[in-house]
Image (cartoon, coloured by chain):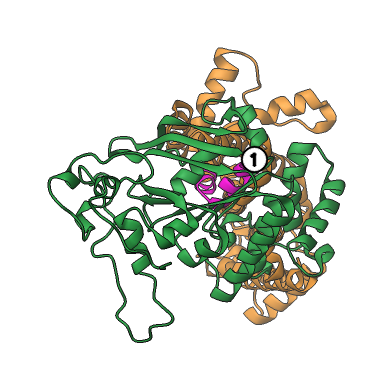
Chain colours: A orange, B green
Amino acid sequence: MGIRMIIRRLGGGLLVLWLVSILTFLLVHLIPGDPAEAVAGENATAADVERIRAELGLDRPVLEQYVTWFTGVLRGDLGRSLFTDKTVVDSIAGSAPPTLVITLMAIVVAVLVGVSAGIVAGLTRGSRVDRAVSALATLGIAMPSFWLAMVLVSVFSLTNPWLPATGYAELSEGFGTWLSHIVLPSTALGLATAAELARHTRGCVADVLTRPYIRTARARGASGGWLVRRHILRNAAIPVVTVLGLQAGRLLGGAIVIEAVFGISGLGTLAVNAVLQRNYPIIQGYVLLCAVVVVLLNLIVDLAYGWINPKVRTA
Amino acid sequence: MTLLSVEGLTIDLPGTQPGLVEDVTFEVNEGRCTALIGESGCGKSLTSLAVLGLLPPSVRVSAGAVVFDGVDLLTCSPRQLRKIRGGPVGMVFQEPMSSLNPSMTVGDQIAEARRLHLGEGRKVALARAKDLLDRVGIPNAARRLAAYPHEMSGGMQQRVMIAAAIACDPRLIIADEPTTALDVTIQAEILSLLRDLQRDLGLAVLLVTHDLGVVADFCDDVVVMYAGHIAERTGVDDLFYRPAHPYSAALLAAVPQAGQSRSRLTVIPGRVPTAGAFPPGCRFGPRCAHFTAPECARPQPHGRTRCGRVASGDLVLEGALHG
C-alpha cells in the first residue's frame, strides 16, 4: 500500500467529514421549531426568547453561525448543551463508552459467529451443515434486533437467571460483571450482522473453491487447514471485509434500539433525548461523531483491501 | 520401465453420461514423453486430472486403476495421494493467470511444495525457490520471489508454474495444455524449457495437447482420444507415417501444410458429440469418411486401434508423411 494512496483516501475522508458538518449544521436549522423558544420554556416572554436567541448567536446570518461553529469544531469545541451546563464533548464522552463497547463487541460476535459459520458452510457446500447455516442466516437477517433482544432476555435472564437483564457496568466493577452486562446486548445487536456475514462468507468461500488456483494448490499436495488458510480465506476475504465495513456503520445506529431495550444510557439515549428537546448542539455532535466513525471504518476497510489484495496495493 | 500406467479408466458424469471417459488404458515410461491428443471435449483433460484425483466433484471415476510406481492412486489413502501430488508427480495447468493464486507471492507458491513435502522452513524453501526461478529462466530471480502473479507476463507465469511443479524433484510431470493460453512465440519457449527439463532431470512427461507440431517435436508415445475413447495408441513416428485410426488420419490431414500455399484447408466435418449424446458403436462413426454399416455401428475392438476396419486389414489409412 503506497503512502500516496493512504493520503488520497485520508483526504477523501476529510472532505466527506466537512460536507457532513455542513449538512449537520443546516439540518438542525431546517428542523421546524425554534431552539430559542425550547430553551426559554413555555412561560417565557417574547423578550426572553429574543435575549436567548442573541445569547446563542441564532440572530446572526447562517453563514456566520456556521463559521463560528466550525472553527470551534476544529478546536475540539462543539459548544454546550442547551439545558445543562456540560459541554457537548463531555456529554458525548460520558455516554459513548457503553455504546462503543456494545457496538465493538457486536462486531466481534458477528465476525466470530458469522465468518466461521460461513467458512464451514462454504467448505461443505450442499451438506446438512451448509443448509442449516443458510436457513439460520435467513432467519437472522429477518429477525428484528429488539425482538431478538427480548427473546434473549427472556431465556437467559428471566427463565434462567444467568445474566443481568438490564443495565451496564463499568470495567472497574470487575471484568466478570462488565462482561455479563454486555453479552446479551452485543449478541442481540450482532447476530443479524453475523447472519449477513455468514451468507457472504459462504458464497465467497464456495466461489473461491471453484477457482483453478485451488486445484493447482491441491495438485501441489496442499489440503485441509493449510489449503483453507493460505489459499481460500485470503481470496474470499475481500467481499466479506466490504460487507463488514458497511455493517459496522449500521451497528452503531442499531445500538440505539438495543440500549433502549436493555435500559442502558449511552449515545442512543443521549441522541434521542437531544432530538426530543431540540438540543441541537448535542445532535450536531452526535451526527459528527457517527460520521467520523463511519469514515474511519471505511478507511480501515480500504487499508485492509490493500493488505489482502496485492492488486490494489500497486494500483 | 513403466512409471505410470492407466488401466481401464472410466469416468462417469452421473445422471447424464456414463462412460464420459471409457476404458482408457495407456502408459507413461520413465524419462519419456507421452502425448494425449484429441479435439477439445475428448476427455484428455479429465483423464489427466483423474490421475491425481483432481476431478471436479460433478464427475466420478467408476472403474479402472491409475498405478504410479506400484501404487494405485485411485484406491490409496488420501494421505498417500497428498504425498504424491506435488512430490514425485508435478502438474502444470493450462491458464497460468487463473491457475496461480493471485494473493500469494510466486516465491511462496514455488516454495509451498517443499514446505509441504520436505518440511522445509519458509526461508530455506524460498532460497530453493530462487534457484528454481533461475532454472526456469526468469531473470532477477531473487527479486522476483516477492512478485505477485499479476505483475508477470503469461510466459513468466507459466515458468513459475513449471518451477513450482518441479520443486520437489518429481519423476513425472503432467502438463495439461501448458501452452494453449500463450502467444505462439512464448509457446515455443515454454516447450523448449519443458524439453530441457525433461532431458536434464530425466522426467517423464504426460503432455495433454491438441497441437500435432508439439507432438512431433517433443513426444515419444501418443495416445489419441476421441469422445472419451482411446482411438489409437502408437509411437510418434507411426502416428505420422502409419496412422491406425481414421480419426488420427483426419487430424493429420487437418494440419495446414506450409509447403503447399493456397491449398484448401481440410477440416473434419461435424463436431465432437456432447456428453450424453455419444453414438453407439464407433463414436467417431458419424464424422468418419470411411464409415461403413454395419461394422462401424457395432462396438469396436479394444487394443492398439479402436477401428475394427483397420484392425482387420479392411482399411489402410494414409499418413501425413511417407517413407
Label 1 element class: helix
Q: Is residue A288 visible?
A: no
Q: Is residue B125 above or below residue A145?
A: below
**Toward which corner of the image does residue A70 lie, by quadrant?**
bottom right
Task: Provide the residue span drawn in magenta.
Answer: A203-221
Closest to the observer: B238 or B20? B238
Is residue B49 among the parts visible in the rendering? yes
Q: What residue occupies the far top of the structure in this picture?
A: A160
Residue B48 drawn at (x, y percent): 50, 45
Residue B287 x %, y %: 22, 58
> Is B139 situated above or below A291?
below
Amino acid carrying label 1: it is Leu
Q: Position of residue B116 (x, y in %)?
A: 74, 38
Q: Is residue A211 located in the magenta-colored stretch of the structure?
A: yes
Q: Which residue: 55% across, 31% down? A: B73
Q: Residue drawn at (75%, 68%), measured in percent from left and top?
A: A6
